Image (tube, helix red, strand yellow):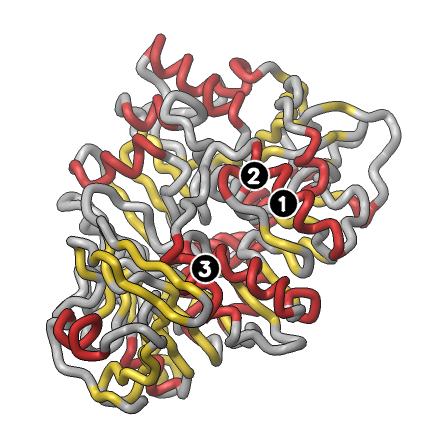
């Protein structure tokens, strides 16, 4: 039977060396009050310490002084296993400093490994990750010098085919954010933007005889309808009721509590953007890229659009009319509707369905998308992409590896160079006024997020769309297939590449 406790009482149940699994997605649906209670206890007593923290998609709130950031920074955590660190500003800076073990696995592979542990299976098999950084034959998942564990990812062979086998340490504490608990302890997620891995986390923790701690906004007397219950009360040990976080009125469009017609997506998106803590950069070069990339969309496509430059694509897809004819998805489990960005990335405006994150990655891993649009830090002559390891900090791979591994059409949206690039388009003519000081096309990428060799083997169609030209992946590497009007082929493209490419315009 569950108990109702304060955040501090719940935090007192966590022991040194526990393995805590947090259900959140980048910056949304994080049980902030529970994290801050852990920090208060650690700050006052030095316990709990030597913690292992696991999260498919990270557990920050874009603020280095809130949620788990403080107790990670001050030393309570000895091992961190995450798919993405983007909403954890201080943590993503220090993971490379050897203060604690830190591992980065593809988001979907962590989600599937959690589900496997819930079912009593040690780990999850996947083709995702082969020939990229996480593959033990390359770098492995360790981010810094002390992260040398060989247990999280292993290369195995099943019936003559290679797979990676992903495992996690035994999860024995669940930290979950839900909307309401009824008198039976059933947890509903009615006002939440997603449910993520919540059920699988709880099942895994209970199988390991651990504690499930759920933070909710309210208690209700009426039992939840069975299909509205995400976590059944029999799996819940502690319920913590906290004052709901105040959210802008515009955020109501993300809860699924009312229908948002296609005609209203743009208005709601703009209202949400006004309150976002993470602003998208307005850049003419990015708009050139987004406009060209949008032409790859076809009616009835099932689509994933990544963050950054790809977020410019819907504007042009709306103008052409194709936006209303495609189905967009987001890694957290949303299908249909329009993906939100910034501080609420992972939520969807007007979603038609929101299911468990592991199910979404079943779709992605098996080639269920028709097309995806991703950003990139670097591309080499062979077409390999680095999208997870930039200079100065480590954001992580997130769902990138899963999304690009089997999708038939992969489109990378990236500027030709950066840091000072100025490019404009007038009518159909592109002018490169100034090149950036940092090249994006390099002899060798810093780390491999996307394997060109495996994409060729899979028969995937891969494009690299910039503000001045388009490359296609072929067996020998990059092939230049398009140069925009106004761009000088030799001066603006070929002279700036550090390697030769086949030109077939």
Dot 1: element = helix
Q: Is residue 106 left or right of residue 380?
A: right
Q: Residue at x 23, y 75 (%)?
A: 488
In this view, the residue farthest toward the right is 222
Quadrant in which the N terminus appears: top right
Query: x and y percent of residue 62 in the render?
Result: 43, 32
**Residue for point 49% across, 55% down:** 311
- Residue 475: image quadrant is bottom left
Left-right relation of 441 to 86: left
Which residue is under mark 1?
A: 269
Mark 3 residue element: helix
Q: Which residue is mark 2?
A: 273
Image: 446 above or below 499? above
Is 3 positioned to the left or the right of 344 in the image?
right
The residue under the point 75% across, 36% down is 186
**Distance (Cα) linking label 1 and label 3:** 16 Å
The residue depicted at 59 percent of the width and 52 percent of the height is: 339
Q: Position of residue 348 (x, y in %)?
A: 63, 49
Decide: marks 1, 2 in contact (CB < 8 A)?
Answer: yes
Gap between marks 1 and 2 measured at Cα: 6 Å
- Identify the mark nearer the N-term, 1 or 3: 1
Tell me the element at label 2.
helix
Question: In the figure, residue 323 lies in which quadrant?
Answer: bottom right
| Residue 213 seen in this snapshot | yes
Cα distance in 3D space between marks 3 and 2: 16 Å
The mark found on residue 310 in the picture is 3
Whole-percent x and y of residue 386?
Answer: 26, 62
Locate the C terminus and report the quarter of the image it occupies: bottom left
């Amino acid at each position: 039977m569950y108990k109702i406790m304060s955040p501090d009482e719940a935090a007192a149940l966590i022991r040194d060396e526990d393995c805590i699994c947090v259900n959140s997605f980048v910056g949304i649906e994080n049980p902030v009050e529970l994290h801050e209670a852990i920090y208060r206890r650690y700050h006052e007593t030095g316990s709990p310490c030597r913690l292992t923290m696991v999260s498919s998609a990270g557990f920050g709130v874009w603020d280095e002084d809130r949620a788990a950031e403080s107790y990670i920074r001050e030393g309570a955590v000895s091992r961190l296993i995450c798919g993405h660190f983007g909403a954890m500003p201080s943590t993503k800076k220090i993971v490379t400093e050897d203060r604690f073990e830190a591992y980065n696995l593809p988001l979907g592979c962590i989600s599937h490994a959690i589900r496997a542990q819930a079912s009593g299976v040690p780990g999850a098999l996947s083709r995702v990750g082969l020939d990229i950084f996480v593959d033990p034959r390359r770098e492995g998942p360790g981010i810094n010098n002390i992260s040398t564990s060989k247990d999280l990812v292993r290369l195995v062979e099943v019936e003559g085919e290679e797979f990676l086998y992903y495992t996690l340490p035994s999860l024995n504490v669940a930290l979950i954010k839900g909307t309401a608990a009824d008198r039976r302890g059933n947890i509903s997620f009615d006002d939440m933007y997603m449910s993520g891995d919540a059920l699988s986390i709880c099942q895994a923790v209970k199988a390991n005889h651990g504690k499930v701690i759920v933070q909710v906004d309210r208690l209700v007397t009426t039992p939840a309808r069975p299909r509205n219950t995400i976590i059944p009360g029999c799996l819940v040990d502690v319920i913590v009721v906290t004052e709901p976080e105040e959210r802008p009125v515009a955020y109501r469009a993300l809860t699924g509590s009312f229908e948002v017609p296609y005609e209203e997506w743009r208005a709601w998106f703009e209202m949400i953007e006004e309150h976002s803590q993470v602003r998208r950069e307005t850049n003419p070069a990015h708009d050139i890229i987004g406009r060209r990339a949008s032409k790859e969309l076809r009616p009835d496509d099932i689509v994933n659009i990544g963050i950054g430059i790809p977020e410019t694509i819907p504007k042009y897809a709306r103008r052409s009319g194709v936006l209303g004819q495609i189905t967009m998805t987001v890694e957290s489990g949303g299908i249909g509707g329009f993906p939100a960005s910034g501080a609420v990335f992972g939520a969807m405006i007007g979603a038609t369905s929101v299911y468990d994150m592991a199910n979404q990655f079943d779709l992605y891993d098996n080639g269920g998308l028709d097309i995806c649009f991703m950003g990139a830090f670097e591309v080499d002559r062979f077409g390999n992409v680095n999208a997870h390891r930039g200079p100065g900090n480590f954001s992580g791979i997130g769902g990138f590896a899963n999304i690009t591994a089997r999708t038939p059409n992969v489109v990378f949206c990236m500027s030709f160079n950066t840091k000072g690039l100025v490019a404009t388009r007038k009518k159909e003519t592109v002018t490169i006024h100034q090149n950036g000081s940092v090249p994006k096309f390099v002899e060798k990428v810093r780390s491999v997020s996307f394997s060109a060799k495996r994409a060729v083997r899979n028969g995937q169609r891969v494009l690299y769309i910039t503000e001045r030209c388009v490359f296609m992946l072929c067996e020998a590497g990059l092939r230049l297939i398009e140069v925009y009007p106004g761009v000088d082929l030799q001066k603006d493209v070929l002279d700036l590449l550090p390697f030769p490419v086949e030109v077939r315009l």
